[in-house]
């Protein structure tokens, strides 16, 4: 059975509707999973319809889908929940690369293109290539394979500007004569410049801002797919790509807002490099008060309400299950337990929610920053697990701090704060944290997981 | 002429995308990101259509590679999102937030 091009396009209309419906459902916790299924169904229908076209080379399609399917499935099921952001970055990069390759293949097959198609080809190759290498850099930063600090080099903006100029001129030459050898060379230049630009534009972003960048790169890949849709005049690519492009931009904006930063600032400021010295001179004074497992046990045992504030340290230590165990013990002890989650805690927005959900914490126990802050004074004990910048009071009361103005979980206003931390290293942003020196703060040093296990043991022997 | 229609669709869809995502609780930012991530694997449709019997040599190589990478994006993206969302508990039947 084969479908005519018109028939396929009718099917695509259904798919586009399923994508929109799926996205809508993804934005509420109750329907999110079904929403993802609906969108996957849309994708499946689109694939089947496309395969019913005439003149396809099924051997290569089968080989390609088999290899890609195996890699994708393996990646999705073997990745640890803590490494989720890395995985999303990788999948995103492969989407960008696919758009670049698709446009290249189309151009290679038919170099005499209409002016509009030429433009779309250049765009799709540029955005796709940039999204690919950008995602790889983001992956490298998240996985700790390259420096998580913002890498700033001299004349960075100048170089980026020059690269963009090179891309635009190459695109101009390509546009004039796509069907000549010269045009083909310009095309290759666009691709290479795009790959380079992905690296130089993402490498200056500090590790703490990588979540925002992933969301932005996600949006780029959507737009690359959209541009590829213009190249092959395929409406479903245009619709799906534009949906992702637009929603990615909105999501990026939401995240920037949560950090009280502008996107421009995230992309160009090289946060956390120039400011370390400033933080050291003014921020932290006072004495560190270390606590043992027993001390912490007595504090928690007596507390009427406890708020856990997790950060990336919890993810690194894989401590989410022990946190939940301790939470259950506290609840059995008659303590009110909540998990206060900063919107940008971890390496990806909502990262902590995912981890705690993995440990079976029901999502009505997860409270957002704006709900916990007004009643912070009534919380007897805040347990900060591997979080740093998102609880740094400098954001509230130190005007010269680089994170000043960023909304934080104001743990310092709780009656007691217990900070679980491996050592006194500065956080992701490289800023000292006055919270650790606070009057009501106890530092509980050690690996988060074993520290919590010690607490659980104390509780079990105590009861 | 078709270009005009495509641009029509494009512009309207951009606005639709803005409207769809304007209010999402931060709990769902990660799944939403990876869910939309899967959707841009739609390039696969284009890659499939560009793997034709009339393509040869370097051309078929490019198309097949595009199919591979787009499939990774689609399959991996949906699977990982589903794995994440399957962990969200519905204790209070959680109506739309």
Image (cartoon, coloured by chain):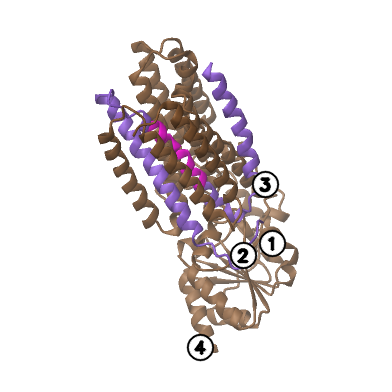
Chain colours: A brown, B purple
Tag 2's secondary structure?
A: loop
Q: Quadrant of residue A378?
A: bottom right
Q: Is residue A411 above or below residue A137?
A: below
- Residue designated by label 2: B93
**Label 2 marks which chain's residue?**
B
**Label 4 marks which chain's residue?**
A
**Are the residues under badges 1 and 4 in a single subunit?**
yes
- Residue designated by label 3: A260
Label 3 to label 4: alpha-carbon separation: 45 Å
- Residue designated by label 1: A410
Q: Position of residue A91 (x, y in %)?
A: 42, 44
Few, some or many C-alpha atoms within 10 Å of disc 3 (few <14, some 14-19, many ≥20)? some
Point 51% across, 40% down: residue:
A218
> Is residue A36 among the parts visible in the rendering?
yes
Label 4 to label 2: alpha-carbon separation: 36 Å
Few, some or many C-alpha atoms within 10 Å of disc 4 (few <14, some 14-19, many ≥20)? few
Point 39% across, 53% down: residue:
A76
Quadrant of the image containing the C terminus of chain A = bottom right
Q: Quadrant of residue A112?
A: top left
């Amino acid at each position: 059975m084969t479908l005519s091009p018109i028939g396929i396009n009718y099917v695509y209309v259904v798919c586009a509707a399923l994508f929109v419906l799926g996205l809508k459902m993804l934005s509420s916790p109750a329907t999110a999973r079904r929403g993802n299924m609906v969108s996957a169904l849309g994708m499946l229908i689109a694939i089947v319809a496309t395969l019913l076209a005439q003149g396809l080379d099924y051997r290569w399609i089968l080989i390609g889908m088999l290899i890609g399917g195996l890699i994708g499935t393996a990646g999705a099921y073997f990745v640890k929940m803590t490494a989720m952001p890395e995985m999303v970055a990788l999948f995103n990069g492969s989407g960008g690369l696919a758009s670049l390759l698709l446009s290249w293949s189309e151009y290679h097959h038919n170099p005499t293109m209409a002016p509009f198609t030429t433009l779309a080809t250049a765009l799709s190759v540029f955005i796709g290539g940039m999204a690919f290498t950008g995602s790889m850099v983001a992956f490298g930063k998240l996985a700790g394979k390259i420096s998580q600090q913002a890498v700033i080099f001299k004349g960075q903006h100048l170089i980026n500007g020059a690269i963009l100029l090179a891309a635009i001129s190459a695109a101009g030459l390509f546009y004039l004569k796509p069907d000549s050898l010269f045009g083909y060379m310009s095309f290759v230049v666009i691709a290479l410049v795009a790959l380079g630009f992905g690296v130089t534009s993402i490498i200056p972003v500090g590790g703490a801002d990588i979540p925002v960048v992933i969301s932005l790169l996600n949006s780029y890949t959507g737009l690359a797919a959209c541009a590829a849709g213009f190249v092959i005049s395929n409406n479903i690519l245009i619709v799906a790509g534009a949906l992702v492009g637009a929603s990615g931009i909105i999501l990026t904006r939401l995240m920037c807002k949560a950090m009280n930063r502008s996107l421009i600032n995230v992309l160009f400021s090289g946060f956390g490099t120039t400011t370390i010295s400033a933080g050291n001179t003014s921020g932290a004074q006072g004495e560190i008060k270390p606590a043992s497992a027993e001390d912490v046990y007595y504090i928690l045992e007596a507390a009427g309400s406890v708020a856990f504030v997790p950060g990336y340290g919890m993810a690194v230590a894989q401590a989410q299950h022990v946190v939940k165990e301790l939470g259950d013990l506290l609840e059995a002890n008659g303590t009110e337990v909540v998990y206060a989650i900063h919107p940008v805690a971890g390496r990806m927005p909502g990262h902590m929610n995912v981890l705690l959900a993995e440990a079976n914490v029901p999502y009505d126990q997860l409270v957002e920053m704006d709900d916990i802050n007004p009643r912070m004074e009534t919380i007897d004990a805040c347990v900060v697990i591997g979080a740093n910048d998102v609880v740094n009071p400098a954001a509230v009361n130190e005007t010269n701090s680089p994170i000043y103005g960023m909304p934080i979980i104001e743990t310092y206003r709780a009656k007691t704060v217990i900070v679980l931390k491996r050592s006194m290293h500065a956080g992701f942003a490289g800023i000292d944290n006055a919270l650790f020196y606070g009057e009501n703060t106890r530092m509980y040093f050690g690996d988060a997981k074993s520290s919590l296990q010690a607490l659980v043991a104390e509780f079990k022997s105590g009861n | 002429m078709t270009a005009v229609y495509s641009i029509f669709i494009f512009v309207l869809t951009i606005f639709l995308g803005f409207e769809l995502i304007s209010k999402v609780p931060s709990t769902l930012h990660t799944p939403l990101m990876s869910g939309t991530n899967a959707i841009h694997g739609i390039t696969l449709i284009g890659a499939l259509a560009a793997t034709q019997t009339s393509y040869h040599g370097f051309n078929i190589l490019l198309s097949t590679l595009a199919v591979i990478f787009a499939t990774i994006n689609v399959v991996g993206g949906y699977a990982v999102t589903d794995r994440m969302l399957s962990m969200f508990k519905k204790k209070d039947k959680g109506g739309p937030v």
